[in-house]
Image (cartoon, rainbow, N blue to C red):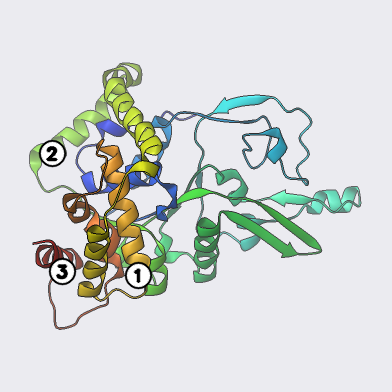
Amino acid sequence: MTTAFPFSAIVGQDDMKQALILTAIDPGLGGVLVFGDRGTGKSTAVRALAALLPPIRQVAGCPVNSADPADIPDWAQVSEKELVERPTPVVDLPLGVTEDRVTGALDIERALTRGEKAFEPGLLARANRGYLYIDEVNLLEDHIVDLLLDVAQSGVNAVEREGLSIRHPARFVLVGSGNPEEGELRPQLLDRFGLSVEVASPTDIDQRIEVVRRRDAFESDTESFLAYWQAEDARIRDAILAARQALRDTKATDDLLRDCAQLAVALGTDGLRGELTLLKAARALAAYEGEGAVSREHLARVAPLALAHRLRRDPLDEAGTGARVARAVADVLQ
């Protein structure tokens, strides 16, 4: 098994790391879309965060990583009900993948050799209680992206085909990455991702040197490098776990809800998904920082993550989406 690079050792890319931490606190945020240059640590960050989180307890051999023997689907043939610990799963979804491979389908081998109608689980089953990572999400077929976003929101994968009627839990954090030069996502799909981040290769020479230095140290003496960053990773993990516990009790006033709505209106976002995500992201950030209530400062810090990708194109405004969000935050939150 490949050893993951420590999350705390990733140089820069603070917005991407913050977005991933927020989804680890509240998976209901709806996933993260990361657009930017190749080689900027997108997949490294996802695997690093998953490795940082505590292992999950699951029934050994359960295809959907069930935490309780009572939750094992009827179609799953699991002989032993022993609970084991395993790392938080990170499942890669390749380009060109078929819908059957994603959702699962009839087990052809068993159908032909034994005459049995059995279900062969897909990638969504493996990703349950973990992360589903899509590189070059903008090149994935639209109907597959639609399917993934629907399942990510409902937490259930339903398969109705070939005489099968199967449902199983599929609760995962969807992380999509891509290079905007190779194609853009449809606005309807952009809106369905909870948070978005734009990443770029660092232009600061010292920062680039530090990236190379840390990667070289990791590859040259992995054990010592992991030991050096272990304490900082543990601090982040403890803060995430504490935030999960505190999330339900983290308050948001009616005035803050008004701020969320005014920001969404000022930016012209469609529907209510923008302000709902903004509120949830701000609450997760407040819980992560040990605050009992959400403040305007929390709103201002997560607004670019929650709203920038929901803006309509304005051909008369040459400013980027980040600048437009910053202006709205300054106007609304003063």
Q: Residue at x 27, y 64 (%)?
A: 307
Mark with earlier residue (1, 2): 1
Q: Residue at x 50, y 31 (%)?
A: 87
* Circle 2 residue: 207
Secondary structure under tag 2 reads helix
Quarter placement of the C terminus: bottom left
Residue 228 location (% of width, % of height): 26, 19
From the viewer's perspective, is 291 left or right of 1? Answer: left
The three-letter code of the residue at mark 1 reads Glu
Callout in the foreground (3, 1): 3
Q: Nearer the viewer, residue 304 or 113?
A: 304
* Circle 3 residue: 324
Residue 65 location (% of width, % of height): 62, 38
* Circle 1 residue: 184
Q: Quadrant of residue 71?
A: top right
- How far apart, in angstroms, are the residues tagged by discs 1 and 2? 29 Å
The three-letter code of the residue at mark 3 reads Arg
* Tag of residue 39: none
Q: Quadrant of residue 220?
A: top left
- How far apart, in angstroms, are the residues tagged by discs 2 and 3? 28 Å
Residue 27 location (% of width, % of height): 43, 48
Q: Residue at x 25, y 78 (%)?
A: 313
Secondary structure under tag 1 reads loop
Residue 145 location (% of width, % of height): 49, 64
The three-letter code of the residue at mark 2 reads Gln
- How far apart, in angstroms, are the residues tagged by discs 3 and 1? 20 Å
